[in-house]
Image (spheres, rainbow, N blue to C red):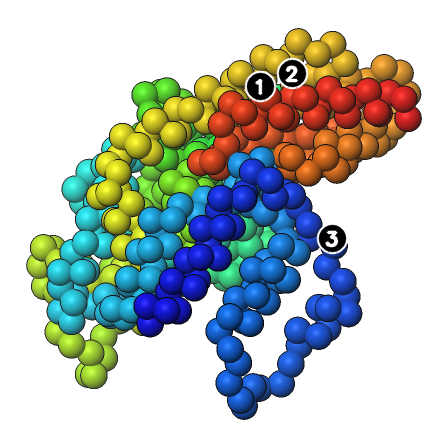
Amino acid sequence: MRGFVAAAMDRITALIRSLPEQPVDSSAEADPEFLRSLAEPLPEGRVDFGSLLNLLFDEAAPLSLNPVSPGFMGYVPGGGIFHAALADLISNALNRYVGIAAVAPALSQLEANVIRWFCQIMGYPKTARGFLTSGGSLANLSALITARVALLGEDFGDAVIYLSDQAHHCVAKAARLAGFPQSSLRVLEADRAYRLDPERLAGAIAADRGAGRRPFLIVASAGTTNSGAVDPLPELAALANRERLWFHVDAAYGGFFRLTERGRRILDGIEAADSVVLDPHKTLFLPYGTGALLVRDGRHLKATHSSIADYLPPLQAEDELVDFCELSPELTRPFRGLRVWLPFKLHGAGAFRDCLDEKLDLARWVEQQIRAIGTLEILAPAELSILAFALKRSGGSLEQANARTRRLLAAINERQRVHLTGTRLHGVFAIRIAVVAFRTHREQMQMLLEDLKSSLADVDRG
């Protein structure tokens, strides 16, 4: 066992040490013949561990997008701090079952602490409950089902869910999986700042009530994927309260910025939400597969997910311990809490707060630098740590302008020092910068600026 771990650690430390020199994206270099060779029948014999490590670290892993690179600023970067990987090693070796508190009460309490910490960060009351899941997609699914059970009962074909055209696509997918017909989704055009407009929303609610529909749920975004925009949470919360609708906030990307003073101001109103989705594998820098759902009144979670069977151990009658199988879809589940609990205990919340503050600073700094370049325009300012920009139109059609911005993005990424991604904002192709990775510092922002300026020259010559 020690030999296996030592051999793996040799490869892991070498990988992490060389991250600044690694290309940010080698996914296109995968040879089809090599990929076909990886499809193999069930192995019957033994293979040396060293050769397996060689395959993983030397051949397979390099042929990918590299989200742990300090230069990765595309999509919303995942984290992957080593302490969480260490926690996974421990939890997988312990292999304790934490779905029911009675069988591992102390470990269940540690995971319950993680949920309490998240509730504290969001400003939730002691009545709140929640659970860890694989990510925002399943957390949004459980949120919609919980709201449906709480407000609609068995007949919900006439219910209406309101969201902006900037909401993450997993919300519409969750609604479909939760049984809502397509006609239940009312997708409203976002305002000029890419936010859900309360006045437009109020009008849609009134129109649906007048048509005999049942307005049911408002989905707000606390940091959209497209532009990082934060919907006007206080106004939306007040509207939901007046109309007696469930107020759900998808804060998968932005929620943990509430650890910072600036983030608390920007995300004011999230504490009024009936439910909140968070992704610790984004802005807590944890490995992929770490999401969370919080519900202000935990009784709704239990009413939705509770199920008993004769073969199960006794469940908790009091609130001192938590049976996560009573609050979530999973009965058998991994001990996810340790990958959050261990890094927080080792470093304290202040380390995460400082890192998030740094990302806010870096996003604002690079925005200022881009504004100073006369041929570029900021389409989405850095409200949190995502911003978007494009080449200014200098005559020609929108399609031609979009094509030039696409060429600029490709030229930046070809240099393999940083990696950015694109999107469309009101029809304009935009280049996004997502400053989220914990290894991204001022040095990488300088690299981005250098590569942007040299790529601009290439596009102009082209």
Drawn side of residue 284 relative to residue 117, left or right: right
Label 3 neighbourhood size at 10 Å, few (<14), some (14-19), many (20+)? few
Do the residues bearing badges 2 and 1 touch, measured as CB atoms within 8 Å? yes
Drawn side of residue 221 relative to residue 317, left or right: right
For label 2, the SS is: helix
Label 1 neighbourhood size at 10 Å, few (<14), some (14-19), many (20+)? many
When the figure is inspected, residue 384 is found, relative to residue 100, above or below; the finding is above
Q: Quadrant of residue 234?
A: top left
Question: Three-letter amino acid code at disc 3?
Answer: Ala
For label 1, the SS is: helix
Task: Please provide percent x and percent y for residue 295.
Answer: 30, 47
| Residue identified by numbered label 3 | 28
Between the residue at mark 2 and the residue at mark 1, the CA separation in whole angstroms equals: 6 Å
Task: Please provide percent x and percent y for residue 403.
Answer: 84, 32
| Residue 366's disc number | 1
x 70%, y 16%: residue: 377
x 81%, y 32%: residue: 407
Between the residue at mark 3 and the residue at mark 1, the CA separation in whole angstroms equals: 28 Å
